[in-house]
Amino acid sequence: MTSSVVEGGSEKPKRQPSDFIAETMNLTAENLSLTTETFFRAASSLKDKVVEETWNRRDQVVDPTVYSGLLGTAFTCLRSYQVTGCRNDLLLCRDIVDTCVTAARASLRHVTFLCGSGGVYSLGAVVANYMGDLGKRDLFLALFIEVAKEKALPVGPEEGGFGMSYDLLYGRAGFLWGALFLNKHLGEESVPKDILIPIIDAVLAGGRAGASDIKNCPLMYRWHGTRYLGAANGLAGILHVLLHFPLPTEDAEDVKGTLRYLMSKRFPHSGNYPSSEGNPRDKLVQWGHGATGMAITLSKAAQVFPNDRELRDAAIEAGEVVWKSGLVKKVGLADGVSGNAYAFLSLYQLTKESIYLERAKSFASFLYDNAKSLAPSNGYSLFQGLAGTACLWFDLHAPQNSRFPGYEL
């Protein structure tokens, strides 16, 4: 471990958000040196605990989503299988998905991967494909494509298309992410372009309509009336999804221009990003709001637009904010240390510089000592609890292949 990590960890940021933990809290040279094997064993043990608490002891499936419910346990088992090759994890994932299907049909009104039926069907298809059950794979794929027939998905603003939101958690970007997940694992055109292009066009049209009164901002969206800028319900998450598609030049330039607009909104003293348009509170450093989600989105943008050095520099600068202020009092992917660690893994893949892997391991080591004390009661979900920590530790086994669950592909 190089001294830069320890020195960086003791540097005091210029601001102290109310949910920030002092860097000295158990972040010592001794526990910065945890090995990959230690993380791997911890991940396996924690995954077993997540399964025990959320699956083995369940009474009924109240929440079948990836984000906060039982399907997040299935995703964690799939991540474990991808690292270990343990077939029991795959079988367990299959059983959980099958249980979630019934609950999802009865309770889920959204179509997204993280918070809707899109997650059940896309994850089910991928698991069936791993198992070689092609009939079941095709059944789940057909169910996902049936969801794509939701008439609000491709309807643009000129046709009254504001009824469905555009965001990652509950809106059209979240459905598109599920399609990307399927096409990655099952092959391109598993979800055909003729289904996806009208939805992409609707997202772009909605963004242009939403930005019509904002100077130098090609795309903007509202969620419940607020112009959020972050990954979960805001602009960064929508742009991140759009960056995965081969857009025409005009559309790609609008995405790039919107990223530049976001970069212009950084707080001048901290470099952090506001949670919403016009919000003066410089407080949140997490995936859902603030620098973490921006670091990951800008890392993707720097790969899509490799000749634009400004995007790469902004990604690195956002990572510095996470390093200075990212040890927060929560554990989850959405708003905690686990999610913040993924910013460094994204930067490691972008830059190939070892300092970012060391920083990810530093945050992961902090979690090794403190995760259970920071987790909420019954906090075993993927995005708000300890399942996300297990995924992070698994991803440190092969950090060059790490992916933020439900966000990176």
Image: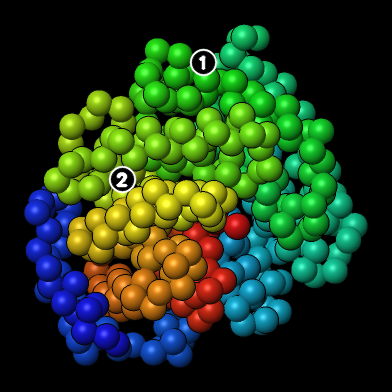
Residue under the point 59% across and 14% down: 157
Q: Residue furthest right?
A: 135
Give the position of the C terminus as an image quadrant. Answer: bottom right
What residue did someone put label 2 on? Answer: 290
- Find residue 101 and report its horizontal and vertical position in percent: 69, 48
In this rendering, position of residue 280 left or right of residue 85: left
In this rendering, position of residue 24 left or right of residue 254: left
Q: Where is residue 124, by image quadrant? A: bottom right
54 to 151, vertically: above or below = below
Q: Where is residue 34, by image quadrant? A: bottom left
322 to 196, vertically: above or below = below
Nearer to us in this view, 269 or 397: 269
212 to 239, vertically: above or below = above
What residue did someone put label 1 on? Answer: 209
Kindly identify the amino acid type of the residue bearing the numbered disc 2.
Gly
Bin the neighbour count of mark 1 within 10 Å (Cα to Cα): few under 14, some 14-19, many 20 and up.
some
Residue 64 visible to the viewer: no
Bin the neighbour count of mark 2 within 10 Å (Cα to Cα): few under 14, some 14-19, many 20 and up.
many
Give the position of the N terminus as an image quadrant. Answer: bottom left
Nearer to us in this view, 163 or 254: 254
In this rendering, position of residue 185 left or right of residue 56: right
Pair 2/1: label in front:
1
Disc 2/disc 1 C-alpha distance (Å):
24 Å
Kindly identify the amino acid type of the residue bearing the numbered disc 1.
Ala
- Find residue 266 and report its horizontal and vertical position in percent: 26, 40
Residue under the point 73% across and 27% down: 198
Query: Which of the two labelled residues, at mark 2 and mark 1, occupies the earlier sequence position?
Result: 1
Nearer to us in this view, 204 or 390: 204
In this rendering, position of residue 16 left or right of residue 293: left
Nearer to us in this view, 57 or 279: 279
Tally of marks = 2
